[in-house]
Image (cartoon, coloured by chain):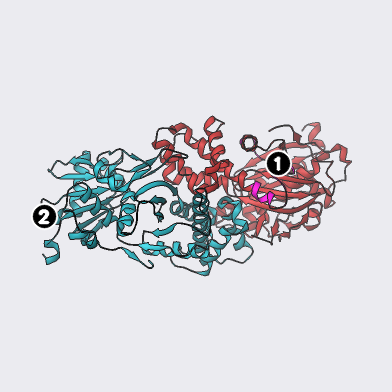
Chain colours: A cyan, B red
Amino acid sequence: MTTDTDKAQLIGLDWGTSSLRAYLLGPGGRILRENALPLGIMPVRQSMRVSNSDLDRAFQSALDSVIGEWILDYPSLPIVAAGMVGSSHGWKEVPYQNAPFDVRQLGSHVGQLKTSSGMIVHIVPGIVKRFELPNVMRGEEIQILGVWATESGANETEEMLIGLPGTHSKWCFLRGSQIMDFETFMTGELYAVVRQHTILGQTMSGDADGLSPAFDRGVEVAGGTNGLVGILSTMFSVRSFHLVGQLPAEDQAEYLSGLLIGHEIQGVQRWIESKGFSRKCLPQIRLSGGSLLCMRYHRALALSGIDGAVSASNTSAIGLWQVAIQAGLTPTLDASKFERGVAESC
Amino acid sequence: MTTDTDKAQLIGLDWGTSSLRAYLLGPGGRILRENALPLGIMPVRQSMRVSNSDLDRAFQSALDSVIGEWILDYPSLPIVAAGMVGSSHGWKEVPYQNAPFDVRQLGSHVGQLKTSSGMIVHIVPGIVKRFELPNVMRGEEIQILGVWATESGANETEEMLIGLPGTHSKWCFLRGSQIMDFETFMTGELYAVVRQHTILGQTMSGDADGLSPAFDRGVEVAGGTNGLVGILSTMFSVRSFHLVGQLPAEDQAEYLSGLLIGHEIQGVQRWIESKGFSRKCLPQIRLSGGSLLCMRYHRALALSGIDGAVSASNTSAIGLWQVAIQAGLTPTLDASKFERGVAESC
């Protein structure tokens, strides 16, 4: 046991569809230990069917795998969980809260689950948007709260655009601490199925795993005149560039990735312009996500003429810590002690 | 043998990636007999590998399966083939012709293939667009020629927009008999992989196999304000509408189909507007393809405010017949004897 872990005050869980990530958090939400396993709610439900177990036993077993050792040391730490664990296919359903929603209120709406082994897990609600096209999030609200909390200068009228790249990228429009609106882009999942299951994937070698001129070219096509016709059409240029000898196999995945992310950014621009912002005067932008993916988004934003985006790190852990404070599970801290998660780039 | 088949003058082949369709054509290009098997170039190449056969033997065998009986009756009929059979993965590669291209010249560029059994197959070239984003077609040029030929009133300046819905929909801008420009939309293939391999498919029951209010709703979302954000975003509404209880499982595939086709039509509009047409004054529109799919496109066009689209039928057979005339393989006919393929609706 280290000195650090002596100070442990909270266990935070980011429990999604495919993976479960746990944080042992100390004063100020500082990450003392971290653990992750592919034990998201889908694998847990599968194991439940295979072993003919019950719901509670299957989820408890997954939880023990990830935080069992910590619990031995700290049996009485509060536990806060966010993500799909609170969905109708999770451990316990916690109803969505309607947007606009003040992220300072997340802690007031956590659902309590008492497990068969006597643990109490506080589950964070997701957010639903019921105007225009409906939209939902579960887990991302924690990251948004994390970004907001690290921006100690944010006041009630300051506006921010938060991008959370991933399998399903979320973009959130925040005013002060209010989630005013958000959009979901299926960019990551589309990339994967196009790569694996369409004719475009057949001529590709390798995957999109770095930044290359081919990535830039995809972003530029998406943002140019041809991009106006939409991704259903520009996507075919992976094949046609290949057939006219202008896109070698090893560049095709990068080009496709650039096209998709480029179209996402064009979509975000049109969405935010519909709120009265001009392309040249957007709200400040924060990105949070895996560092390699964030790097791609930074590059694509810059190529699309959007400068000044800043990455925020450890937003899930910071958000979970904040919820615990809101719910009175950990001592309130002086704001100056927050772990700052903002860096100049990913 | 019937009287009709006594007049057989040409065998036309539409030989694509997955299927091979053959037409026995009589005077004026009239279809006397028709046969189709799943013997496109990919299955043929697979059978070649499995049976350790050579290329010529594998393609000859597929051809015999489809037109063997006709050849017994008419051993000396000319054979014209279009589609992927002329690609680098086909039987014999016939180079692309550059757009703009006059469809009256297709017959001058056919490639000749002499098979091991002594047949001569005349293979139609594909078309490549080397300006803007490159694009390619193989097989669709025959349908375009077929549409042009049935529009006997078309003069050298008349403009037409030809839509060919399918796995990869093509839209061609024709001026007189010149293919001026064309676009490809991967709508059909995207629908299939999203249905089968993404999270959206998991909650769907059934497939998009009819027209329903859910299809209309998808088209309307694509054409509305939310549609401007793009399909990467609107696609997620299949899930979010479901989660807020506004889209039952049995409607989801129809809604997704409407969304995708609606976005394709929005893309076509923006593309054709970039050529100086206004949304209210588009060129005349002809559709050619499977009748159920055409019906969906007619509906989606009408919902998108585009009226007056007309379906053309049997365009592949008519186009193959026209190429044979151009190449001097069949007697030239009085234009009035052409089989007219234009109908008021699919």
Check disc 2 and give the amino acid type.
Answer: Tyr
Residue in front for this viewpoint, A48 or B161: B161
What subunit carries mark 1?
A: B
In x, y percent, where is residue B67?
69, 43
Q: Write down the region rendered in magenta.
A: B268-296
The residue located at (61%, 45%) in the rendering is B266
In the image, residue A57 sits, relative to residue B179, either above or below, namely above
In x, y percent, where is residue B262?
58, 41
Taking the image as shown, residue B146 lies to the left or right of residue A185, namely: right
Give the image quarter of residue B112. bottom right
| Marks 1, 2: nearer the viewer | 1
What subunit carries mark 2?
A: A
Q: Quadrant of the C terminus of chain A?
A: bottom left
Q: Which residue has dot 2 on it?
A: A74
Q: Which residue has dot 1 on it?
A: B280
In the image, residue B290 sits, relative to residue A245, either above or below, namely above
| Outermost top residue | B212
The residue located at (37%, 47%) in the rendering is A179
SS under mark 2? loop
Determine the CA span between mark 1 and mark 2. Answer: 70 Å
Check disc 1 and give the amino acid type.
Answer: Lys
